[in-house]
Image: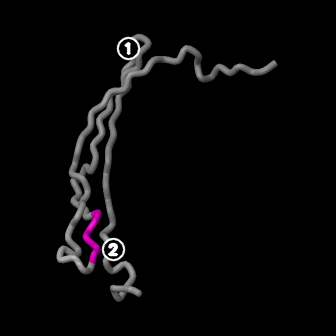
Amino acid sequence: MLVTPQIDSLRFPNLWDTDVRAAKTLKINMVDLRLILDIFNVFNANTALVRNDNIGSPTFDALARNLSPRIARIGVTVGTEPLVHPQTSFASR
C-alpha cells in the first residue's frame, strides 16, 4: 500500500558532494614524508540526508540530519624505503 500517489514523491534531492585531496611527498635520506591536505564538502552543500518519516509524529518531515559542513584535514605519513626493491623476484629453481 502506497501512502503517496507516486513512487519516489518523497525522495530526497540528488546528493552532490565534492571532496579534494592534495599531497606532496618529500624524500629525506631514507625516509618518505607525505604531507596531505583533504577538504571535504568543498562547496559547503547543506543537503538533507535524513528526515522524520513517521507519519504519526508531530515532527513529520522535519530535518533529522544534513550533510556535514566543509571541513579540512591535515596529515602526515612517514615511511621508509623497502630494503628489497619490488622488481626483485625470487624464482624457484
Q: Of 73 and 28, which appears nearest the observer?
A: 73
Q: Quadrant of the C terminus?
A: top right
On the image, the x and y values in percent for residue 57 come to 22, 76
On the image, the x and y values in percent for residue 37 come to 29, 35
The mark found on residue 10 in the picture is none
- Horizontally, residue 92 falls left or right of residue 7, namely right
Task: Label 2: state its secondary structure.
Answer: loop
Badge 2 crowding class, 10 Å Cα cut-off, few under 14, some 14 to 19, many 20 or more, is: few
In this view, the mark in front (1 or 2): 2
Q: Residue furthest front?
A: 56
Magenta-drawn segment: 49-54
Residue type indicated by callout 1: Ile
Q: Of 81 and 27, which appears nearest the observer?
A: 81
Badge 2 is on which residue? 11
Residue found 31% across the figure and 77% down from its top:
10
- Horizontally, residue 37 falls left or right of residue 7, namely left
Does 35 appear above or below 7? Answer: above
Residue found 41% across the figure and 16% down from its top:
31
The mark found on residue 28 in the picture is 1
On the image, the x and y values in percent for residue 13 come to 30, 69
Q: Quadrant of the N terminus?
A: bottom left
- Horizontally, residue 71 falls left or right of residue 22, namely left
